Image (cartoon, grey):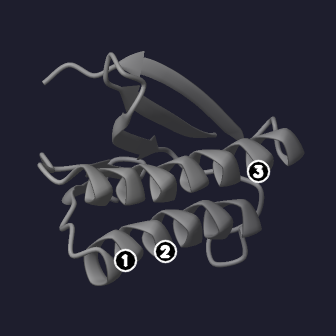
């Protein structure tokens, strides 16, 4: 199962997204659930980096069951933060839709961001 955790600030802004595990929907290389989650995460990270010039703090460890952490750095410009949050809310919505369609393969939870 893929577990996705969104860490929220007190103002409900998304600060970090941590994705762990593998869906197990199909064999490696043919798993559409894993591919969808990976594609969404990579697409949003690329948009943040290349369009908004916001380099995310990224941690990856595929050796221990799959692990990806995307953390938003501190952003002083309100407009840029609003744009980043729009992309991260899009990611949240995309994952929620996937979890609705594949509930036995994806679980989403939310926690308070702890620096």
The CA distance from mark 2 to mark 3 is 15 Å
The CA distance from mark 3 to mark 1 is 20 Å
Q: Give the residue at mark 2.
A: 43
Rate crowding at label 3 as few (under 14), some (14 to 19) or many (20 or more) other CA atoms within 10 Å.
some
Q: Tell whether 109 sits left or right of 31.
A: left
Q: Give the residue at mark 1.
A: 46
Q: Residue at x 29, y 83 (%)?
A: 50
* Residue 98 badge: 3
The CA distance from mark 1 to mark 2 is 5 Å
Rate crowding at label 2 as few (under 14), some (14 to 19) or many (20 or more) other CA atoms within 10 Å.
some
Q: Quadrant for the C terminus, please.
A: top left
Q: Nearer the viewer, mark 3 or mark 1?
A: 1
Residue 16 locus on image (x, y percent): 32, 40
Residue 105 locus on image (x, y percent): 73, 42
Q: Secondary structure at mark 2?
A: helix
Q: Secondary structure at mark 3?
A: helix
Q: Residue at x 25, y 49 (%)?
A: 78
Q: Residue furthest right?
A: 101
- Kindly indicate the quadrant of the structure image that contains residue 91: bottom right
In terms of sequence position, does the residue under pointer 3 or pointer 1 come before the other?
1
């Amino acid at each position: 199962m893929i577990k996705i955790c969104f860490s929220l600030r007190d103002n409900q802004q998304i600060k970090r997204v941590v994705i762990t595990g593998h869906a197990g929907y199909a064999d490696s290389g043919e798993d559409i659930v894993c591919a969808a989650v990976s594609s969404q995460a990579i697409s949003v990270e690329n948009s943040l980096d290349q369009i908004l010039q916001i380099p995310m703090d990224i941690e990856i460890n595929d050796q221990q069951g799959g692990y990806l952490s995307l953390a938003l750095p501190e952003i002083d410009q309100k407009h840029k933060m609003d744009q980043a949050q729009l992309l991260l809310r899009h990611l949240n919505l995309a994952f929620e839709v996937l979890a609705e369609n594949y509930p036995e393969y994806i679980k989403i939870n939310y926690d308070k961001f702890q620096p």
